[in-house]
Amino acid sequence: MTSWRLRRIIPFLVLALLLILGAWVAWVVWHVNEDLTSSVDDVEQLRSAAEASDVDAMNASLEELEEHSGSADERTSGLTWSVLTKLPWVGDDARGVRVVSEVVHDLAINGAQPLVTVSADLDRITPQGGAVSIDALRDLQAPVEQAATALDAAVTGLDSEDPVDFVMRLRTKYRELATTLRDARSTLTSATTALEVLPSMLGEDKEQNYLLVFQNNAEIRATGGLPGAVALVRAEAGRIKLSRQVAANSFANAPRPVLPLSDAERTLYSDRVGTFFLNANLTPDFPRVAALMAARWEQVYPEDIDGVLTLDTVALSYVLAATGPVQVGDTSITSDNAVQELLHEAYLRYEDPAEQDVFFREVARRTFDQVSSGIEDPQALLRELARGAREGRVLAHSFDQTEQQEIAGTQVAGEAFGDGAQPRVDVTFTDSTGAKMSYFLRYDVRVQPTSCSGDGVQGYLGSARLESIAPADAASLPDYVTGGAAYGAPPGTQFVIVRMFAPAGGAISNLSLNAKKVRADVLEQEGRAVSSFALQLEPGQSITLTWRMKSGPAQRGSTAVRVTPSIESGTRSSVEPSACV
């Protein structure tokens, strides 16, 4: 062949080769997309089968997931995909898809299978006939820990790539997957902790006594609500029973604090945080709340307390979604009406506070009996309890040091003070109306990281919008609801104390109320700057409070924002991405 003919043919050969390579790459990309799409469908089918406790369907879905995710992982690990990751414009996206493929396949192999095992055995670890099988709890420790380890590796893998430069659709899906896996990791971490501590907490070796405290969101407190019904729960060898039941308001004001108070506690909350059982949770730190409650109980009753558990009325409504309604007199308490019946209607129905207390204790007892006797759908109960824990509505503290070390750092621990390694902001709400007007309180809190200095100090812009949805004629409600002006709030209005806690070693400044600068004292509690602001809300009124914050040095990570649980379902808390990346 002459050289001129060769020169004419070469461009066509190159073009043909490029077309073949392009077709090959397109074919690989198409198959990877199909495999990942199928994997998403497999996960959804696996979730549905798990909720239905259909073991055969779970195993079939898991087999499909392993096949599809394995195919995607294999294709994105080959030479063709490696070349794609080096190309301009598409390289970032190709690396992101490869990470997703690796993560999903690893989860299918190392994470999903143990979860299938756990799902099949969940009925063994929920109460049946007033007892929980400690052997069943022990049996599930290994598979749950294996799944938690796989999820931790998956989150770490996703965090290895920054999706900021991905194409919009991939960036959105990547972040959604990361959020889902972080939530799942958090849930499994809590489950691992629960399986570790529950055998001893359920009296594996000796009888245990716990206070079960129901928090009333209609009179808001830092950890959720005013302590209402209180019950002593006894556990021995897995058997649990409700013993003594009392109203929290039956504890008289002690002559002096039950435990020594710090100067900051006295200044922020007054001595009554330590003298009055109802005010123990003015502080947002649940370990401290538990210690104060237990100490006051032990002054009045003979039992030594091994731990304190709380849940609020919204969490109780979640539990009723799994157990079904409870009947108290002529009233059926359901998941849908529990908040309205327990936090408002009861005060209209029963004028005598003593009758209200009897009603509340009976609701608590009947709900406890339904849970402890066994329910048809144990997975639903565990899901709803986990939901309450994620929203900060279910809290637990053990006075056994080993058990508490396991609980510490989890969502149910409710700690406000720690080592300060991760920046955290707490925004709490406390009613000072002396009434049940928080039933009409709505609020939204935003804390946005805005800057990062060279020494790792993050700056924040914070806001809290509060609104009273009380009716215009709220003053006509019973005095027990409005407070009857006993603490200075005209009937129908409500006084709310908002407290902002800066990250450890940080600062608070530039407070504004409805865009007008205001002064507020900034104190310090256990290394955290705290600012308190008292607000008065008329029916229908809304108020916006804004402020600036700084973290302490070398706090470059994401910021945990914890907000007092609201009377509305869902959470106002969040984890905000760092401004230092």
Image (cartoon, rainbow, N blue to C red):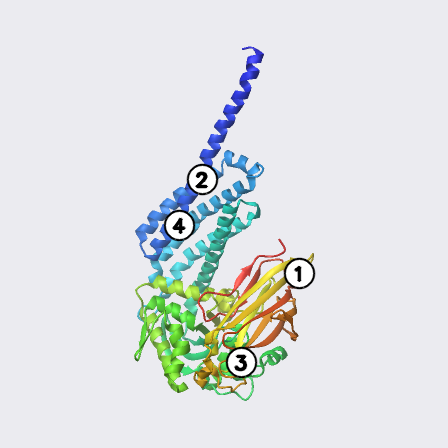
Amino acid beneath label 3: Ser
The residues bearing labels 3 and 4 have C-alpha atoms spaced at a distance of 48 Å
Q: Residue at position x 45%, y 75% from top?
A: 439
- Residue type (three-letter) at the residue carrying disc 4: Val
Looking at the rendered structure, the secondary structure element under dot 1 is loop
Amino acid type shown at disc 2: Val
Q: Secondary structure at mark 3?
A: loop
In the image, what residue occupies the spot 56% across and 64% down? 446
Residue 43 numbered tag: 4
| SS state under label 4 | helix
**Which residue matches tag 2?**
32
Relative height, residue 92 to residue 247 (above, below): above
Q: Which of pointers 1 and 4 lies earlier in the amino acid sequence?
A: 4
Q: Are marks 2 and 4 in contact (CB under 8 Å)?
A: no
Percent from the top left, x then y, of residue 139? 38, 59
Residue 356: mark in rendering: none
Distance CA(mark 1)–CA(mark 4):
40 Å
Which residue matches tag 3? 432
Numbered mark located on residue 457 in the image: 1
As measured in the structure, the alpha-carbon distance from the residue carrying label 2 to the one carrying label 4 is 16 Å
| Distance of label 1 from label 3 (alpha carbons) | 34 Å
Name of the residue lying farthest toward the front:
472
| Viewer-closest of 389 and 232 | 389
Task: Tell me whether circle 1 and circle 4 mark residues in contact (CB < 8 Å).
Answer: no
Residue under the image location 58 percent in, 37 percent down: 88
* Distance CA(mark 1)–CA(mark 2): 42 Å
Residue 61 percent coordinates (x, y): 35, 48
